[in-house]
Amino acid sequence: MYWGHRSEYSVWLDSNGHRDAYSNFEATLAISEQTGRSESTPRTIDEVQDFMDKERDWLFGFISYDVKNQLEPLVSEHPDHIGFPLIGFFVPDKIIQMKGNNVTFLYRKVVKGDIQADFDRLNTFVSQETKDSSTEVARIRMRIHKEAYFKKVNALLDHIHKGDIYEANFCQEFYVENTPLNPVQTFERLNTISKAPFSALLRWKGKHLLCASPERYLKREAHTVLSQPIKGTAPRGSNAAEYKKISKAQKQVPIDRSENIMITDLVRNDLSKGALRGSVSVEELCEVYSFEQVHQMISTVKAKVANSKKATDLIRDTFPMGSMTGAPKISAMKLIEKHEETKRCLYSGTVGYFSPNWDFDFNVVIRSILYNAETQYISFSVGSAITAKSNPEKEYQECLLKAKAMRKVLESKNP
């Protein structure tokens, strides 16, 4: 990942050992070494599908949250301090996939000795360049302070009590200005303390995503599509006995179950738009999974689709993901826009890949740091689901819990 991130376009996807029945690999590195071609790749949903129809090639990249404005009658007028494009995909020159003891090299052009040299790089843990670099201790600021947060949450609760919406995922930004960051080294530290199943390190020219996401947005494999929304968060606990007790108790917490079931129902409805009739099912409901920082309540929704169903049609049917919006989705997104104060940018969007046969796998960009190297602006956002039973103080504390890992890596100086 270290040498790969030197290319202007690269993605590292890491499951951190969380392999399940749906995993295709443990880690994948995709690199584009030809800048000109990468800059001519798809920039809209329609262009993505046109490319796949014509080229039948790999695409790695991202879809930002505000693509919602292209899919629905919505607008976003808040400032954007990072500057990722709405959509960015590149055709990789090199794909390296790791699974078990096997490493697979998919190269567009093979030069003698190239694969061996890259294999040797994989075994080099940290480059000298990375060892010698450091990151300043960050002075983290809040975009929405506590009193304002309470006011906004109470306003959303008024809408819920009036019946305008049932749930809204309200987010707030933390940011750092004029501070240089070593993206690879910071990601390594974030990934080490989080060990999330959908982690990603992405470089798009001078913009970087450092993602420790526990959540899958959408995956397609042949005729099967699945989504795994998360709603319901509890602290990990300080020892084995404590986190086992918390994990067991969380499954019965009414507000967590209510949040999760509402969003699971929304995901079922989204998937049904493109699924074969009667094929949508909930494989797991409100199961609690434990991670390094938190316990999360996760449901798994599956559906069958026709072979002719285009990949981007499934994205259109389901984006943005319900866990980051609320229900009903469009009404919730309008209220989110009203009360949040910055564009989410790539946060609440997705990173992943399309394969040549239209299969794909995308995460939910949460628990992530965004960095613009040119402006030296660092951003991370966190949110929680506001429902009729929400308590503003508890929602605020949940946000701080979710922010813990990002704060930790930014507030301590790298060696």
Image (cartoon, helix red, strand yellow):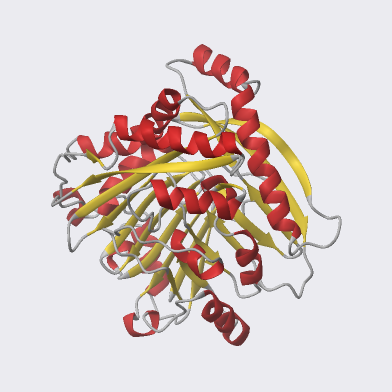
Please state which of residues 149 and 404 is positioned toward the viewer in this rendering: 149
Which residue is more in the foreground, 46 or 69? Answer: 69
Where does the image place residue 266, in percent across and percent down from the top left? 67, 48
Q: Which residue is rendered at x = 76% and y = 55% of the image?
A: 303
Q: Reply above or below: 101 against 169.
A: below
Question: Looking at this rendering, what residue extends furthest in the right direction?
Answer: 278
- Residue 276 in view, yes or no: yes
Return the residue found at the far top: 241
Residue 90 horizontal side relative to residue 265, left or right:
left
Q: Name the quarter where the C terminus is drawn.
A: top left
Number of residue marks: 0
- Find residue 228 and report its horizontal and vertical position in percent: 63, 46
The N terminus is located in which quarter?
A: bottom left
- Decide if residue 352 is on the left or right side of residue 358: left
x then y, percent, for residue 69: 48, 66
Q: Is residue 157 above or below residue 106?
A: above
Image x and y of residue 110, in percent: 44, 80
Which residue sits at x=70%, y=44%? 265
Q: Quadrant of residue 10?
A: bottom left
Question: Looking at the image, is 26 positioned above or below residue 361?
Answer: above
Q: Residue furthest front?
A: 162
Which of the pair 379/360 is nearer the observer? Answer: 379
| Front in this rendered view, residue 22 or 328 | 328
Height in image: 388 above or below 103?
above
Horizontal relation, residue 226 to residue 121: left or right: right
Q: Judge whether residue 126 can be spotted in this image.
A: no
* Residue at figure coordinates x 77%, y 72% from the top left: 307
State the image quarter where residue 357 is shown: bottom right
Query: At x 35% / y 34%, what residue is drawn?
Result: 149
